[in-house]
Amino acid sequence: MLLSRHLSWKNSMRTAIVATIVALTPALTAPAAQAAAPPDIPLANVKAHLSQLQSIANANGGTRAHGRPGYLASANYVRSQLDAAGYTTTLQSFTYNGATGYNVIADWPGGDPDDVLMVGAHLDSVTAGPGINDNGSGSAAILETALAVSRQALQPAKHLRFAWWGAEELGLRGSQFYVNNLPSAERARIKGYLNFDMVGSPNAGYFVYDGDNSDGTGSGPGPAGSAQIERTIQDYFTSIGVPTRGTDFDGRSDYGPFIAVGIPAGGTFTGAEGIKTAAQATLWGGTSGQAFDPCYHRSCDTTANINDTALDRNADAIAYAVWTLATAVPPVTVYADTFETATGWTVNPAGTDTATLGQWERGDPEATTSSGAKQLGTTVSGTNDLVTGRLAGSSAGAYDIDGGVTSIQSPPITLPSASTLSLSFSWYLAHGSNASSADYLRVRVVGSTTATVFTQAGAAANRNGAWATASASLSAFAGQTVHILVDAADASGASLVEAGIDNVTITR
């Protein structure tokens, strides 16, 4: 784990979402995958790899850091395991600080070469210690998952690639080198990246990277597809009764170079030097007021510095995510609108709107600020979105929603029969501290019945605009012709309220 990885630590609290598992959208339709249940990864096997990494460190001055013999020995150990299991492996070399570093890249044969799911962890330690939790834990867990792929002779729809990165502790040097040196066509084939950096912390938390920005903090959502990765991992932890919380995409682990070029990402993390709060100790056990990993970047980060329960759960979560995402049948798009052209959305369809300003419209929005971003001037894709009063005017309150409710409705959408259907969209709701819980952004589906599938209420607090993603099942509407109805309200008097919607998609 990069030293600065969690200096801006996020302790956002939220309930894990049980959601429909959807695969990342591939460039081409992939062949049918072999049906196979995700395996239970044996904890003993993962710990055996950690013992090997400890022995390597012991024989090489107590460290497995970049440029030291212990790192190359670690890379050779991982590579030998993968070669014996039938992977095609590459030891990719690079130079940093006058020393040679190495990435181990392993490809499992088969799967759609234009739809690559990549799984990675950094293999190096800091110079101060053997790095068994940081990040022998992630390295060993994905290694044993890769070996389980071989034991099961998995035939995934996606092409599977595993990676162990060098020199992460010096600034993501190995993963950055890999991404920078990929030809653009090869980079485009990677449709998802899963990152596992510290998954056995002794005072563990259960954090999942916030792909959809539902926490509303920090750097915003990951690239499109990150929300699906997050939900898949959350689904596993929900299935075993373990609550999760979000951790921000702050760019300080090896997912950083991938999301920087638009590749969706996700993963888990059990905590570094951040301090566990009393609420987190109540949620997960452990000791409040103590670091998640008291041996972070120290010589005591040995095999004694591992929480077996956390390591076991995270290894199984990794396998679940790999099997689920790699073997899922790609979704088929039933309806999509990015709002780059007019497609027939109707403002005030029932003729009952009361808003006097800030009515919904399709257009190129102008940015406004008031104690932070309120109307976003950038869209999720292209230049247009659905926005409440696209103009900025002379102040943030010039074209915000005023006077009540504004609504906009899609053209009729005919849904297929007997299908599992999912609606997804990007959204934001922004308001000033003069708002209240009576203000809202809402999405409904209108067919033979009307269902509210999303609501975000306001509050008497400042909320800045930030794109997030949401999804909902539409299976109850299969075979019907429906409309998507979006409304937003300034319902608590003269308060500053702005909203936006983009990239509405229905898949089956």
Image (cartoon, rainbow, N blue to C red):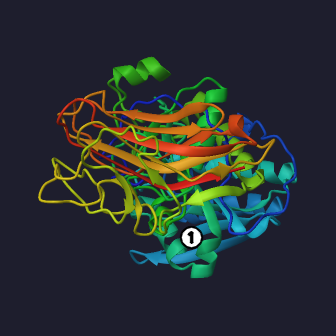
The answer to which of 276 and 499 lies nearer the viewer is 499
> Which residue is painted at 54% across and 73% down in the image?
178
Indicate the position of residue 399 as horizontal and vertical percent values. 22, 52
Q: Is residue 298 left or right of residue 453?
A: left
* Residue at the left extreme, as displayed: 394
Q: Position of residue 484 (x, y in %)?
A: 55, 45
Q: Up-down: is 161 above or below 405?
A: below
Circle 1: element type: strand
Q: Which residue is mark 1?
A: 102
- Which quadrant would residue 264 be assigned to in this image? bottom right
Counting labels gives 1
Residue 239, position as x, y percentages in the image? 67, 28
| Mark 1: amino acid | Tyr
Does residue 196 lie above or below 333 as drawn?
above
Q: Residue 464's x, y, as percent?
A: 27, 46
Q: Hey, which residue is sitting farthest top in the picture?
A: 282
